[in-house]
Amino acid sequence: MKKLLTISLILLMILGGCSVKSADEYYKETESKGTKTVTLTVNCDTAVKYQKGGERVRGDILTDYEVSIGEGDTVFDALKKACKKKQIQFEYQGSGDSLYIRGIDYLYEFECGDLSGWEYCVNGKFPDKGCNSVTLSDGDVVKWLYTCDLGADIGNKYKVK
Amino acid sequence: MEIFSIKNLSFKYNKSDSFALRDVNLDIKNEEILLVIGESGCGKTTLLRMLKKELMPFGEMSGEILYNGEDIKNISDRTSASQIGYIFQEPDAQIVTDRVSSELCFGLESLGTDNKTMRAAVSEFVSYFGLSDVFDRKTSELSGGQKQLLNLASVMITRPDVIILDEPTAQLDPISALDFITMLRRINSEFGSTIIIAEHHLSEIYQLADRIVFIEKGQISAVDSPNKIPEKLKGKKIERTLPAPVRVYNAFGFDFDCPLNCRDGKRMIEPYSNSHYISVKELNKDNKIISAKDVWFRYERNSPDILRSCDLCIYKGEFFALLGENGSGKTTLLSILGGFMKPYRGKVRNTSNKTVYLPQNPRALFVKETLREDLNLIDNSFEELSLQFNIFHLLDRHPYDLSGGELQRAALCKLMLTNPDVLLLDEPTKGLDYFANRRICRQMWTVV
Amino acid sequence: MNSFKNLHPGFVLCYFVFVTFFSVFSFNPIYLVSSLMGALLFALMIQGVGAVARSIGGYFLVFFLIAVTNPLFSHNGRTALFFINDNRVTLEAFVYGVVLGVAVVSVLYWFRCFNEIFDSERYMYVFGRISPGLAVAVSMTLRFVPELIHNFRQVNNAQKCLSDNRCRLRRYISSFSAVISQSLENAVITSDSMRARGYSLRGRTSYTRFRFSRRDGIVLGIFIFLAALSVTERHSFSYYPDFVCSDFSLLSAVSCVSFGIIVLLPFLYEVREGLWKFSASRI
């Protein structure tokens, strides 16, 4: 009994710092309009090619979608806002600088081999940082691309430093 | 035919100045029972160990030992392991594994015997040694006697030609010792195994031996059959350890053959018994010091009763002996009289100021590096008492380096330092040779 | 009610390994539920209703925790129930948690039964098959540790009645060091005894009382047949992003049924042996 109490207490404490909303509430929330606009693309053509004949027939999850963001918003914030608007599922782990996107639109890392996962580029360049530590400026072009080969198939060949 | 022949064997331990064995010449015949006697430290163990290649002590050796005509150092490990069996004094320490079944097979496993043969051998020897009831048990659950029988069985299972036994019954109670000796006799007569045995307690083994070797200070001073050797031992200290009928014979010198057992002894003294009496002193039964009334005890809620309705009364100044088989509850009763355990029913009244307890294993009393430190823990006026107990010269030794008798005396001394009214001794003479035994007994009389 | 125990330990080990692995890796609710039922039935058989009933509370807690925590950490799945911050809590993740919970609980029950059945003698058999030397080492350890504890108690008691005013920790320490040196001394004799019985010889074997009998052969045959059937056409199930269940075919139905029989093997064997006991009871 004591154990049960402690466990539920811990659960309460964890949940206490969270806001719980139903799915409808979450998606219908309107965000305040930001000052800047960036263009977002989410694409997984590589995965479609990799899983030939699989369920996924189209790789273009989002193409040139314009998101309005606020001051100091990061690549992650832009993705979050876009996904919320378009009701796209995504999952991340961690927080702050070490935040990491595990999957977008039910497509997760490692689903297309050991070297697969999501990478992003801003204006054609792949930053070597976590997506929550790169702040965007007005007019930036952000692409989230799924790789099956540690970046080599999307123009970001992995280099050993 | 000789199975062993020892020629001019001398041996000196590495760190010692004196010879442990000197000029030993001995032929051991096939299928005989050879009894080796002698005081503690006379070289019995050294001699026995020289006969087993794996156990040979390190040191300077001269002369030779032939096993079936071959130098013992040259026989193969396999032969030595399977044909020469060795049994030690300590029933517990020589057991290797946790289960009776695996312990029994240890030797066969070493020799690489296949499972089918092992199973056959196991079923044969388990019933031969009467171990079928304990076959599934853990070795730690056996009594001392059963343990030693198990050790004998696990040596016999490889069908050795010779079995060497180093005081195998020293740690056993008299009944288990008798069982063990009886088993040895059966093995000798049914398997024809040669048996070489060193012993202190001679009453049972003496009459079974074919020949007896008496070792004195590393030298063989007499070898003869049991009924001839008593005369050669006349006047020596060892004479006092011989079985009672032999001692009587030696003391009075009757004009017929030396009796080896009580039957013959009784026949010998019958004509004299009418004219001689033994008188017994009456005890003063005024001061009760410990009394137990209707005491019941068990160790765990669902275990059987160890003591059932036990009544006992001990008087001041009394010398009270508890007799009984192993496992009959002697130790339990002592612990209850000492107040270390509580009976679940009945009453124990102890009117003494201080009751002390000497456990079966007296080592349990010592925790320091030297005896001196240990005794100092109790009282610093220990030197006088240590003289009285004849351990003064041992004070700077480590308690575990003492021999059985020395340790027992040291333990008694430590207990006496606490000025007890009642001394509870749990088998204080176990594992001691006759002389150490007598010493403890004398010491106890002086205490009383 | 423990006839399964009398089967050859090699077979018993194979059986448990197969059943637990299958339970863990199938992630198929049909297999898992039948595995849980089989394990529960087995536990009831060998431990009785009382012991199993008492254990259920604890196992349920484990199950509950897994079922609840999985959706909090895994946000995959198409059906969002609600959002916590920006993370969706999905029905699929919850169902997956339930399945995982059933898998863990059924494995725990299988282990429970395994522990009951596989005693030290059976372990020794397995060790002996791996290496006879290992078997001896394990056996010596099994003997040494309880012996050490026993000796420690003895020494400690003797010390207790000698002097009661000293601090307990110091008494423990001195008793412990005394016991250790005592054990070292005994170890000398033990090693002598081992050498005297040829421990150093090459080609050691390991004794076992277990014989592979005809009965073991029959049960093993049935087991292998069923196991082969149950792995041929696995009926697969996936949970993310939606539940997908492969179509039933005759073969997948057969493998489901044969796995069902496998988990019931201990029970069926018990029934079979019960017939013998019945015939023995009429003597």
Image (cartoon, coloured by chain):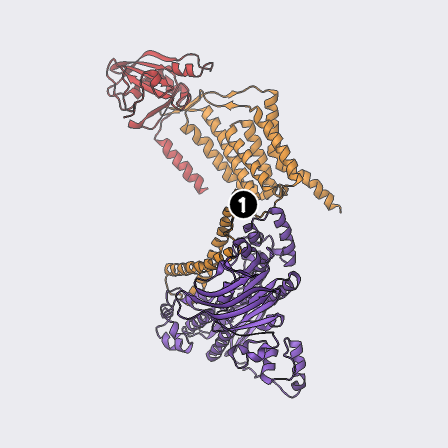
On screen, B394 above or below A123?
below
Nearest the viewer among C21 and B284 is C21
Nearest the viewer among C275 and C216 is C216
Circle 1 chain: C
**Residue B410: x percent and y percent?**
43, 71
Q: Residues within 10 Å of mark 1 (few under 14, many from 20)?
A: many
Q: Quadrant of residue B146?
A: bottom right
B230 with respect to C158 (left or right) = right
Q: Quadrant of residue B145?
A: bottom right
**Quick one: which residue is furthest to the right in this view?**
C283
Per the rendering, the colour in which chain C appears is orange
Numbered disc 1: secondary structure: helix
Nearest the viewer among C186 and A85 is C186
Locate the N terminus of chain B by quadrant.
bottom right
Q: Name the residue under label 1.
A: C128
Number of numbered discs visible in the structure rendering: 1
**Residue A146: x percent and y percent?**
37, 18
Q: Residue at image x 64%, y 52%?
A: B123
Per the rendering, the colour in which chain A appears is red
**Residue B210: x percent and y percent?**
61, 70
Tell me the purple chain.
B
Task: Look at label 1 and name its amino acid.
Answer: Gly
**Residue C20: x percent and y percent?**
53, 34
For residue C152, say whether it is visible.
no
